[in-house]
Image: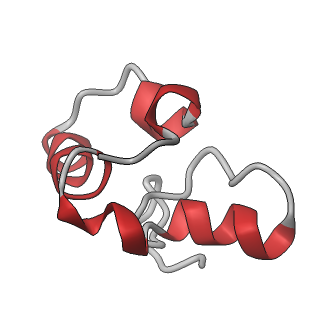
């Protein structure tokens, strides 16, 4: 499990779409938390990840890669 889950905007979002649930299960609660692009963004940029950035690096708005 990801140690950033409780403070992560992606994890806490009220949108319970199927894609968001699958990403939460795989990244936030599953084995992929170590490769989370939100976590990497925050480490690289030194600031909080964009709200629309999914843990896979794609925008939750239009499914385009943003990081």
Taking depth in this image into account, of 61 and 30 the one nearest to the observer is 30
Q: How is the image coloured?
A: secondary structure
Question: Measuring 56% from the left and 34% from the top, which residue is drawn there?
Answer: 9
* Image quarter (top left, top right, bottom left or bottom right) of the C terminus: bottom right
Find the residue positioned furthest to the right.
Answer: 46
Vertical arrangement, residue 58 with respect to residue 16, above or below: below
Q: Position of residue 50 (x, y in %)?
A: 69, 52
Q: Is residue 56 visible?
A: no
Asked if one can make out residue 4 in the rendered structure from this viewpoint, the answer is yes
Q: Nearer the viewer, residue 55 or 32?
A: 32
Is residue 59 depicted above or below 18 in this figure?
below
Task: Tally the numbered discs.
Answer: 0
Work out whether 63 lies above or below 10. below
Whether 12 is drawn above or below 9: the answer is above
Instruction: Specify whether 8 is left or right of 26.
Output: right
Q: Position of residue 66 (x, y in %)?
A: 59, 76
Between 38 and 5, the one lying in front of the other is 5
Write the residue at 62% across / 44% down: 51
Residue at 18 percent across and 54 percent down: it is 30
In the rendered image, the residue lying farthest to the top is: 14
Residue 44: quarter of image: bottom right
Horizontal side of 36 relative to 27 (left or right) equals right
Instruction: Left or right? Give the position of 46 relative to 25.
Output: right
User: Can you give x and y, in whole percent of width and height, for residue 19 in the image?
Assistant: 19, 50
39 relative position to 41: left or right: left
Residue at 51 percent across and 70 percent down: it is 37
């Amino acid at each position: 499990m990801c140690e950033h889950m409780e403070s992560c905007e992606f994890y806490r979002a009220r949108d319970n779409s199927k894609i968001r649930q699958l990403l939460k299960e795989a990244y936030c609660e599953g084995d992929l938390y170590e490769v989370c692009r939100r976590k990497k963004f925050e480490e690289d940029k030194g600031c909080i990840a964009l709200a629309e950035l999914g843990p896979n690096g794609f925008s939750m708005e239009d499914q385009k890669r943003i990081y």
